Image (spheres, grey):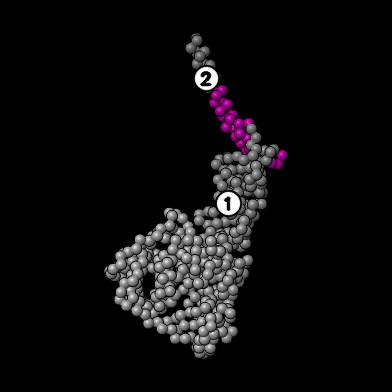
Amino acid sequence: MIIKKKHFLMSVLLFLCLFFSLSGLVSAEWRTEDGATTYYSNGQKAVGLKTISKKKYLFDANGRLITNQITKYNGKLYVSRADGTLITGWGKYKGKTYYAASSGVLKTGLCKRNSNYYYFDPANGAMAKKAWISVGKKTYYFSSNGKAVRNKVTTINKNKYYFNSKGELQKGLQRIGKYYYVFGATTGKMLSGSIKYGKFYYYLNPKTGRAITNTWKKIKGARYYYNSMGRRQTGWLVLGSKKYYLDPARRGAMATGTKKINGKTYTFGKNGYVTYNSSSNIVIQVNRKKCVVTIYDNGVPVKAMACSVGRSGHETPVGVFTIKDHLAWAMLDGPSLGQYSSHFLPEYLFHSVPMHTLSRNPYKVEANDYNNLGKPASAGCVRLCIADAKWIYYNVPVGSTVVISDNAPTPLGKPTPVRMPKRSVGADPTDDFKNPAGYDVTIK
């Protein structure tokens, strides 16, 4: 009899457990109350942010489902669709695009997504399209697909602009590929024609905006020469066997006729040059394997220099060449600048270790570059310390022979280069700060 009572009690308990379990399931339900949609779970009305069947919903303080609107909740923005589900990931609402985290929180401000940059209005989370946006001191343009224009020149409302890899509008002098451009200091618009930017004049092709380099240009009856940096040159210029004077008093206009310069009278004639004796007894030999430059005068070795020739994949060309010109400054890859540069081919020079700047700032030499003198490290040119580059600039005439090979003799051996402190950035230890073209900074 006792056993039967125990079985009866167990059956009652199982029934009650099953009943309350089923009651709990039934209590998780959607309801309509006073025209509003509500949701109950375990007898509790949902309020705030909830996940239901793996979807996000937002309920107001009274438990009413929020639909078809943008809501600010606990300082964050959410978009509720017509059915009350929140946008997660990419989504559209009333013709505008939004992006939300998996929690439903809308992204706002400047955001990076899959290597692209977007901007979402902080007030409502809507993605910017066909719009200029400033964030701090940076300016961006977001195209019709919402992506920031990046890493290219683009035309907007008939004007050209340049944006870097982060989508930031660039201004001033810029090197893009092998060419130089100037963009307005205020607007960022690409400039063209004859302009003055900073201390220098440039001539920018009216169709492409590219600065002309290493060439002459006639403007309003006067001839001007623009160097490898695109800058209009002033003072003496030697090209091959011809020596020109580009009058600083006339903004670099080529002198013609008879002119007195520093107390000496020169006759330039109508073509603007005097004959320059380019014959030279000096020969420069470069040994690529040893990274040594040896200077010969009348066949006698007189000076040796440690250098950096081209690294693997960017080898310095071998062969017999001639010195084409001497430049106090030259624009290099990077972009960067080199002092006391001497071309032996249109794209190859002897020059100082580069300064990673677009201004003539001698304090921008990096030890990582400088301390590689004596090893292959350049992009193909022959790098030297400033003292050695300056020696070639002043002592090796235009027209002198340059021989580059892997087995050139090194009768004077290989000098030990001076070193900079590791990981430092500063001036070349051999610089005497007397560049004839001057600097863009105050010399310490």
Magenta run includes residue 21: yes
Q: Left or right of 93: which side holds 287?
A: left
Label 2 packing within 10 angstroms: few (<14), some (14-19), many (20+): few
Q: Which residues are magenta?
A: 15-43
Instruction: Give coordinates of residue 329: x percent, y percent.
Output: 48, 70
- Residue name at image x 52 percent, y 76 percent: 233
- Residue name at image x 40 percent, y 74 percent: 395
Q: Secondary structure at mark 1?
A: strand
Q: Answer with the quarter of the image where residue 31 lies.
A: top right
* Front in this rendered view, residue 320 or 17: 320
Per the model, the C-alpha gap separating discs 2 and 1 is 54 Å
Type of amino acid at the residue the image marks with label 2: Ser
The numbered mark at residue 99 is: 1
Instruction: Give coordinates of residue 145: x percent, y percent.
Output: 57, 60
Type of amino acid at the residue the image marks with label 1: Tyr
In the rendered structure, which disc, 2 or 1, sits on the residue that comes first in sequence? 2
Image height check: is 188 above or below 203? above
Instruction: Give coordinates of residue 219: x percent, y percent.
Output: 57, 82
Magenta run includes residue 106: no
Furthest toward the front, the residue is 263
The residue under label 2 is 11
- Residue name at image x 51 percent, y 82 percent: 245
